[in-house]
Amino acid sequence: MSTQSQIEKLVDDRMIKALERFKISGGSYWQKISKFQVIKDGKTWQITDAFDVGRDYRKCELCGHYPCRHLYVIESLDTHEKLTIGSECVLNYVKDINAREILLRYQKNFTTKIMSVQTSRSNLIKMADWVSKNGPHALLSSFTRQILSGKRLSKNQELVLAEILGRTISKEAQEARTQIVQLLTQARQKVRNDWENRFVMSLVEQHNANRLLSEKQLVILRRIANY
């Protein structure tokens, strides 16, 4: 399996796990929603599915309204005909007086999160690919956790992400990074007191967050590593 294929499989596995968590958390809502009945032209319809299309807006097959983002599939209990309708139509025709609150919670806690994760696959792959080539990055880790929790990146975060992904690390910089890792490893084994231990561990955290070490820090680090 190629490196790219491995990255995509890793991303897809993490996405599947995230979606499974949402399914569990949204299960109690769906048990209620699937029992909601919609009355149209005096006939009873049942809600059979719900989804969020994000910016890929659809048209409501009941009233013709466009654009609709949150959609529900209803099925006639008599003819088994199915219609995909907007969330407002569901709220207008559903019998249960508690439906509005439950449907809105379901949209927020389930369908919207699913859509957010599914539409972020390409970004997740790009971030995983960047890390595989350049090493860990604190912001990329934070963005990944945010996306997999079902929260979209803000416009500002998207700009920061684009800037990070546009960066490349030269061969010389990569070699310097490897040398620093070796120094940190040696220093952790050579520390003589609590202060040196705290100092070296702070540099480890700084390095893992992709923040450059100062010349003064490097001088002290080399001294400890060369004990």
Image: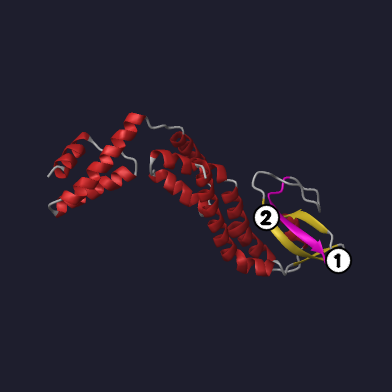
Dot 2: few (<14), some (14–19), or many (≥20) neighbours within 10 Å? Answer: some
How far from the left and from the top, in percent, is residue 93? Answer: 78, 62
| 172 versus 199 height, above or below | above
Disc marking residue 43: 1
What amino acid does circle 1 point to? Lys
- In the rendered structure, which disc, 1 or 2, sits on the residue that comes first in sequence? 1
Q: Is residue 165 visible?
A: yes
Q: Compute the Cα span from label 1 to label 2.
A: 24 Å
Name the one closer to the observer, 205 or 116.
205
Q: Is 70 one of the magenta-colored residues? A: yes
Q: Residue at x 59, y 49 (%)?
A: 118
Image coords of residue 40 (percent x, y) = 83, 62
Q: Secondary structure at mark 2?
A: strand
Image quadrant where one finds the C terminus: top left
Which portion, as a residue range, is magenta? 67-79
Residue identifier under label 2:
51
Mark 2 residue type:
Phe
Task: Answer with the quarter of the image where residue 51 lies.
Answer: bottom right
Residue placed at 86% from the left, 66% from the top? Answer: 43
Residue 89 in percent (x, y) is at 76, 56
Residue 150 seen in the current view: no
Please name whichever residue, 64 or 180, is drawn nearer the observer in this view of the structure.
180
Residue 123 % position (x, y): 53, 42
In this picture, residue 192 sits left or right of residue 208: left
Residue in the image at 39% along x and 38% along y: 134
In this rendering, which labeled residue sits more in front, label 1 or label 2?
Answer: 2
Q: Residue at x 77, y 60 (%)?
A: 74
Residue 151 is inside the magenta segment = no
